[in-house]
Image (cartoon, rainbow, N blue to C red):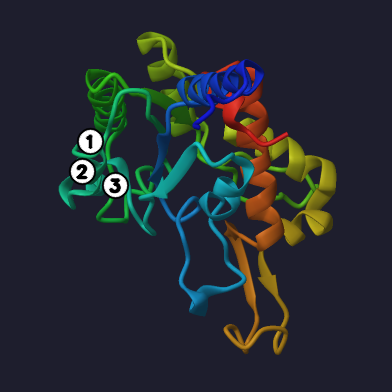
Amino acid sequence: MRRNPPKHLILITLAALAISAMSFLLAPKHITVYLAGDSTMADKETKAYPETGWGMPFHDFFDSSVTVKNIAKNGRSTKTFITEGLWKSITDSLKSGDYVLIQFGHNDEVPTKKSFTTEDEFASNLSRFVKDVKYKNAKPVLITPAARRKFNAAGQLEGTHEVYAAIVRKVALTLHVPMIDLDRESQAVLTKEGPEGSKKFYNHLKAGENSNYPDGKADDTHFSVLGAKTMAGIVIADIRALQLDLAKRIKP
């Protein structure tokens, strides 16, 4: 004779199923965070090590509900990021709720480079980026270019992005989008460390120290592993300070 299971077992089973279903419904929607920028943000080939873009350690800060896609490339400006189709590769894939972190200026501001954009073009391109992201119901975040390490004879740090960083701030204010002032915040870090101490954040190597740079290297633009982690940490701290929804997905 077949017996029905006891009522308390049925209730326990139903409760377990309900909890499982509720957990599924409450689980955060998976999102993608796109990084659009230049060499200071970009992924690097093994042959460039220890040069490291701050976008490389950035994904380590998030839980499994976030995928970070680093589209940043060496030498790109807002202009070449568009003309080479890199920006389109982002907008074609964007979904509602995704984020796009946008950091340009290093190559836009140099008149001798093919990537040069005028101040008006730079502002226009940034505005386009913001509007394209919003059109997809995604969330743009503008970032001023990370500081170069440039100390004068008196040991004082000199800003090298004054004009183009100011344009980023103005566009963010005009279009009411979150902005991370990586230029000013990284300058503060370098100033605190001074001319010698700040070298550890950049790709500074002595001859024979690394096989990728047998003659040594003195690069005051691109980061070391420590420098990249430090810059990524600044961005993460500002995501929290700005109280973006993305902050909820940062690992404890």
Quadrant of the rendered image containing residue 141: top left
Q: Is residue 75 visible?
A: yes
Q: Position of residue 18 (x, y in %)?
A: 53, 19
- Which residue is under mark 2? 82
How far is the residue under mark 2 from the one under mark 1? Answer: 11 Å
- Which residue is under mark 1? 91
How far is the residue under mark 1 from the one under mark 3? Answer: 23 Å
Q: In terms of sequence position, does the residue under pointer 1 or pointer 3 come before the other?
A: 1
Relative vertical location of residue 79 with respect to residue 132 in this rendering, above or below: below
Q: In what element is the residue under mark 2?
A: helix
How far is the residue under mark 3 from the one under mark 2? Answer: 13 Å
Q: In terms of sequence position, does the residue under pointer 3 or pointer 2 come before the other?
A: 2
Q: In what element is the residue under mark 3?
A: loop
Q: In terms of sequence position, does the residue under pointer 2 or pointer 1 come before the other?
A: 2
Q: How many marks are shown on the rendered structure?
A: 3
Q: Nearer the viewer, residue 215 or 47?
A: 47
